[in-house]
Structures are given as C-alpha cells and as structure tokens.
Amino acid sequence: MNKFDYMEKHGYEQMVYFYDKTTGLKGITCIHDTTLGPALGGTRILNYASEEDAVLDCLRLARGMTYKSAAAGLNLGGGKTVLIGDPNVVKNEAYFRALGRFIQSLNGRYITAEDVNTNTKDMDFVAMETDHVVGLESKSGNPSPITALGAYHGIRAAIKFAFGDDDVTKRTFAVQGAGQTGYYLINFLVENKAKKIYFSEINPKHVERMQKEHPEVEFVKPENFFECDVDVICPCALGAVLNDETIPKIKAKVIAGTANNVLLDEDRHGNMIKEKGILYAPDFVINAGGVINVFNELGTYNRDKVQRDVEKIYDRLIDIFTIAKEDNIHTQEAAKRFAKMRMETIGRVRSNYVPR
Ligand code: NAD
C-alpha cells in the first residue's frame, strides 16, 4: 500500500509512528480530519499480523471517527491510535504513561480514549502524562450504559419512521449479544415495557445473568437469531453480521443496535437491506452515545446534560431517514451525506479570521 496515495484519496491530515525504547511501546496515531475540532478516537491494542494491517486499521478507524463525531453534532474531528502487541503481555502503568507522553507531544490535535483491549483504568495512567485523554475512570467512567441509552432513543426513532409511532409497548425485539451494551439496552426495553424481547448470546454467564434478572426475556439460539419473527432486530455483539447470508433471513422491519461496522459491505448490504424494505439505523449514528459521553469530559462533566445530548440521536436519525427516503439512497449513505454536510457548512463558517 502506498500510504501517501491512500491519505490523499481519503483526505487524511497526519499519521505518526512512535516507539518507546524503555517499555517497547509500538504504535501509530492517525488524524483524519480536524475541520470541526481536535481529532478524537480511542486507543486499541492488538497483536496485528503485520505492520500493514495495523496501519490500515488505524487509517480506517480514524476516518470512521470523523463521520461519527460530525453526525453526532460534536466539535471534534476523527483520529485513532493502534498499539501493536499482545494486550495480555504489554499492558502496565509505564506502558500507558509512555503512550500519554506521545499523545501530549501532539499538542491537543488528537485526544485519545479507551477502545478494544484498553479500559478507563488504563486511561487514568495515560492522563498522568497528558491533558488530551478522555473516558477516565474518575470522570465519565464506563460508556456502555450511555451508548445503550442512545441506541434506545435511536430505536424509538426508527420504529416511529417505520411504523408511524415510537411506542415500544407495541413492538417486539430481538437483541444479539447481552454484553456491556446489549445488557443495558435490554434493561431499557424492559423498563419501558416492550411487548416482547428475545436475546441471543454465546457466553453462558451472560445468558445466566439475563435469565436470572429478566426471566421474561426469551433466549434464542445464536444460529436462529436473524430468523426471529420480530419487529426490530438489535445487533449488539459483532461487526459484519449483515451480509449475503443473514439479510435474506431477516423478517424484522427495523435493524437498530449498538454494534459497529455491522454491514459487511456498506454499499452492497446497505442496498440489499433497503431493497427488502427494512429500515436500518446507521451504526455510527445510533451508537454515538459513547463518544458524546467522553466529549462532555472536555467541559464540566454533567450526567444529566449527557443524557439530554444522547437523546438528540432520535431527531438526528429522523433527519437521516428523511434524506434517505427523499434521495432514494440507503441509510448508511444518507448518514455519511449528513455528516459531510455539517463538515462543509461549519468549515465554511470558520473560514474567516476572528481573534479570540
Ligand atoms: P461486549 O463484548 O461487552 O458484548 C458483546 C456480547 O456479544 C458478548 O456478551 C458476547 O458473548 C456476545 N456475542 C458474541 N458473539 C455472539 C454471537 N454470535 N451471537 C450472540 N452473542 C454474541 O461488547 P459491547 O461493549 O457491548 O459492544 C458490542 C458492540 O457495540 C461492538 O461492536 C462495539 O464496538 C459496539 N460499541 C460499543 C460501545 C460501548 O460503549 N461499549 C460504544 C459504541 C459501539
């Protein structure tokens, strides 16, 4: 891969390699676009098969963050950090403090947070060396309940658009995955008296927890999940689950959940879903609760304000569904247009010089 060609094609601003000789920390930070504000994106640790895989993952994820924050109405750009290594081996205080020092050297152009194989406690170590980290154990804490709350509001918007009203008591749901976000989403659906809820899981502990806390929520075998005869399916487990094999089986009229990158191929599967007359809530819009939550750490963190901000996912999705309908395009495409429109409009407003 020619990295500069790739950066030029997709409008990247910066890619930084770093290595710390005391801890062996090896990583890459990509800044995709800072039109709206500093680039924000989590740090993930993976034992990548090759450096090329790590670079591609970092570039792709940074770009995704630009659209996610733009569509969420945040004054943030998109960035990401990937660290190459076995998370069971490399993680310790010194390692994360070394990371913090590199992040500080970017002088606030990039803000990090937790992601795959890192957590809020790790970010507390990062914060000992940099001001440019959010999602701290001591501040906003675990983002999953807020992500699930955002998804709950997004689900209400989707059923309003698909069925004419947003009353969950009339609707049936199947949730794939009862982990961090799926568990809380099911709780919101139960609290709000959804007509019927099914769930599927592969982790016996999570199945047991759900059956103990909510015996009325019915277990479905993972292999039968997509055939569930319900109004709404909620992917809250894995990426790439909407594909050539699963889409033909779907009976639901709405797909809306917390999982990232659920369309195996955005255009092909976005269109397949549209052609089946199913309404799909774009993943990066409906699951933006986590980034809205950490963004609020940049000011004075207030949980009530975060909950109000997250509720706006409802109106945002209605706008996106309307664009998709009017322009006859799939909803993932409409969500990207929505994000790009905001970047263009705000970018133009900021093109004049105003001293502050
Ligand atoms: P998690 O690992 O806590 O939960 C996922 C659950 O899915 C696990 O319990 C797992 O056992 C189950 N699972 C895995 N494969 C399955 C299968 N084939 N069928 C049924 N269940 C299966 O993860 P999470 O934090 O809830 O995240 C879920 C998705 O949401 C991911 O795609 C993640 O990127 C996305 N997301 C999470 C957040 C957040 O705040 N946690 C924010 C934005 C997006």
Image (cartoon, helix red, strand yellow):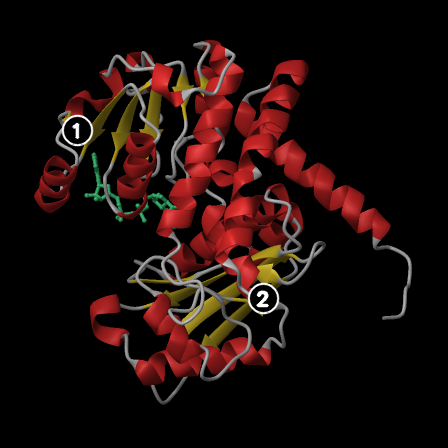
**Quadrant of the rendered image containing residue 227:** top left
Label pair 2/1, CB-CB below 8 angstroms: no
Residue where numbered disc 1 is placed = 222
**Quadrant of the rendered image containing residue 116:** bottom left
Residue where numbered disc 2 is placed = 298
The answer as to whether callout 1 falls within 8 Å of ligand 1 is yes
Query: Considering depth in this image, is 50 or 213 the residue closer to the camera?
Result: 213
Q: Residue at x 54, y 50 (%)?
A: 65
Q: Residue at x 49, y 31 (%)?
A: 282
> Does 51 sit left or right of 342 as displayed?
left
**N-term-proximal mark, 2 vs 1:** 1
Query: For the residue labelled by badge 1, is the local secondary structure a helix, a strand or a loop?
Result: helix
Name the kind of residue labelled 1 in the image.
Answer: Pro
Q: Residue at x 28, y 35 (%)?
A: 186
Query: For the residue labelled by badge 2, is the local secondary structure a helix, a strand or a loop?
Result: helix
Disc 2 to disc 1, how far (Cα)?
40 Å
Label number found at residue 176: none
